[in-house]
Amino acid sequence: MRQDKEVQLTDNALTVLKRRYLLKDQQGRVIETPKEMFLRVAKFIASADRQYGAQDQQVEQTAERFYNLMSRLDFLPNSPTLMNAGRQLGQLSACFVLPVGDSMEEIFETNKHAAIIHKTGGGTGFSFSRLRPRNSVVASTSGVASGPVSFMKVYNASTEAVKQGGTRRGANMGILRVDHPDILEFISCKSDTSEVTNFNISVAITDQFMEAVANGTTYPLRDPRTGKQFIRDGQEQALDAREVFGKIVENAWATGEPGIVFIDRMDRLNPTTLSERIEATNPCGEQPLPPYDSCNLGSINLGNFVREPLPSTYTLTSPSDGIDWERLAHAIHTAVHFLDNVIDVNRYPIPQIQAQTKKNRRIGLGLMGWADMLVKLRLPYNSGEAFELGERVMAFVETEARNQSSEMAAIRGRFPNWEGSVYRQDNLVMRNATVTTIAPTGTISIIAGCSSGIEPYYAIGFERNVMDGTRMQELIPHFEQRAKEGGFYSEALIQKVVSVRSLAQIREIPDGVRAIFLTAADISPEDHVRMQAVFQKHCDSSVSKTINFPESASKADVRKAYELAYNLGCKGVTIYRDNSRPNQVLSTVKEKERVATASPKVEKRPAILTGFTEKIRTGYGNLYVTVNLRDGKPFEVFAHIGKSGYTTMADTEAICRLISLALRSHVPVEQVIKQLRGIGGSAQILAEGGRVSSIPDAIAQILNRHFGAPDKADPGDSAREICPECSAPLQYLSGCYSCASCGYSTC
């Protein structure tokens, strides 16, 4: 097979591939190159053509097209396809939705199915809306039901115990209808961010509820078993819609959750709405699915389709002239062919999913590199021209993807559930029930070396901690190139850029460049919503997008964004307000300078101190932590880890020595807790008080229990979440923290 070109990858892409994607031997050594990975995937996916009469030479030609598309980084499939195609596991889909029935047998059967899916690298979505409310009578036992939230916690614990083949963490979406009697408990179930950590949660909002919010009226709660108005103590139950909406807003403002999905709109716009209802979405919310359905995703890298150099006729008022539409159409057609083939060679985790998936043959072709395309075209992300271009690009993708699906249907046959779809009414023959989905593309965008999804840049520069402890400054390549061409590049400038989320105050950068290289912090929440809405207009499924807010945003601001999203036709909303999650670790130059310039006085240790010893269970064994006090405050910390190796004991001693030095130097214990809390490790477990992520996290939890820690970072600091694997900044996208440096993700 002739290969079009060698694979050109960034250092970050190579790091991610080596850690999670390339084949390894039994000793964990990488035995596959990126080129060999793309060849493995291309050949395996192309083999599906044989099921439709293709000869060996035709299959080889298809494999060549697939390889060239991926090796040029014009398109990449979702992670399970890259990881598992042509390998023993063979599970290639990313998104699954499972039903949760209202019996103990159904609940735990679904939990088993979810564990199987997580083991193969997929993410699962559930609606808990069928479960009877907490304290309802269970006739078979004469007991009372524990309610949806309690069983969501059972699923959460199960997810924690299952590692996805050593490649990805388990991720779930939990959804509850807004008219379920337990909705208030559900809305606040993640107000403690150490709870239900393996779930993103969303409230399924109905049109009736939104009308009640607009009118200031109550709305009825529904009995999940009968569908009629819920009765408790002889009274029909209803809630004030604005109060419930306010609770959703309040919790989202405080922690980023719950998100919301407009379930009636999802149902109404589902192409198979004539025969089935949407049950839930995948963990990031972009793929609404009926029970047992799945979807395999892939994304076009838009930045690769800008004409370089831009034609002489190009103008900012006509940016579409800068796009190679013909090459983009060819990529879309090849990608649809690829994704349809995945359905036929996929190894499904359970028979019900195989049957439902082949019934609808859903695929989800999406986009990444949108921010790259805009900067190459010299368009600000929040400009009118950018909104117009976004709608045109997505309409083009939708049209070309449907055309290709229709052409394939003429040869391979339409999807079996076509009779139960809207396409029958329109007499449109389709191979696939859905063809477009916009996913967050966290890890595959790192491999492609592009911006994620349709998001703006999170930051223009950041520091990365490489293996030998060296810290390196990294910039968005397009900005670095522009700075060098414009003559304003310098090491001093890089130091400024990597220390901030926005370039707005860096005057060394020309106004025209700052206007183009915008970050999520520069975009108003309203413009975030508007960008999501223009792409949603031409998307079969849904759009994964984070609506970012500054820390100073009010709850009223969040409420306005939700209402705008509903009015503009979005199918769901995920918001995040800066620093709204506790235990954020600062990594800015400002904080480093404050530490570096301080000259603390280290107190001498008295001969006698008293304190306490507490045991906490960790993934390395029981940890015994001794905290000695002086004047009622912690003065030094010792810890002993039982049944562990010398290295672990040495690391534990080192941590405690540094903690003690900090405390004796009058560093507030709250700052010590903040630095240690939530650090991830390879042996995370669920203990009595919640998840224990590592030895430093365990020590921080004990300190926090006795001495407390504030939830917010210091005012005025630019705070960023820090990756536990490489110490680069994490970005929050669609309910998940992900690292642009090493590919770590909380989903």
Image (cartoon, rainbow, N blue to C red):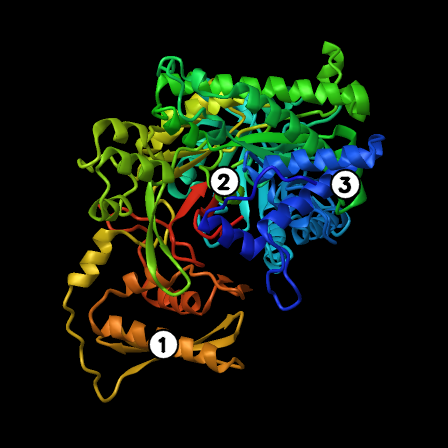
Q: Is residue 25 above or below residue 713?
A: below
Amino acid under disc 2? Ile
The span from disc 1 to disc 2 (Cα, nearest Å) is 41 Å
Say which residue label 1 marks.
654
Between residue 460 and residue 143, name the one nearer to us: 460
Residue 83, percent across and down?
A: 64, 49
Badge 2 crowding class, 10 Å Cα cut-off, few under 14, some 14 to 19, many 20 or more, is many
Quarter-wise, where is residue 611 in the image? bottom left
Residue 411, percent across and down?
A: 80, 22
Amino acid under disc 3? Val
Amino acid under disc 1? Ala
Q: Judge left or right: residue 627 versus residue 150.
A: left
Q: Judge left or right: residue 247 versus residue 407.
A: left
The span from disc 1 to disc 3 (Cα, nearest Å) is 51 Å
Q: Judge left or right: residue 727 versus residue 212.
A: left
Q: Nearer the viewer, mark 1 or mark 2?
A: 1
* Label ID, residue 196: none
Locate the N terminus by quadrant.
Answer: top right
Residue farthest along the top direction in this orientation = 426
Q: Judge left or right: residue 7 versus residue 697.
A: right
Say which residue label 2 marks.
187
Badge 3 crowding class, 10 Å Cα cut-off, few under 14, some 14 to 19, many 20 or more, is many
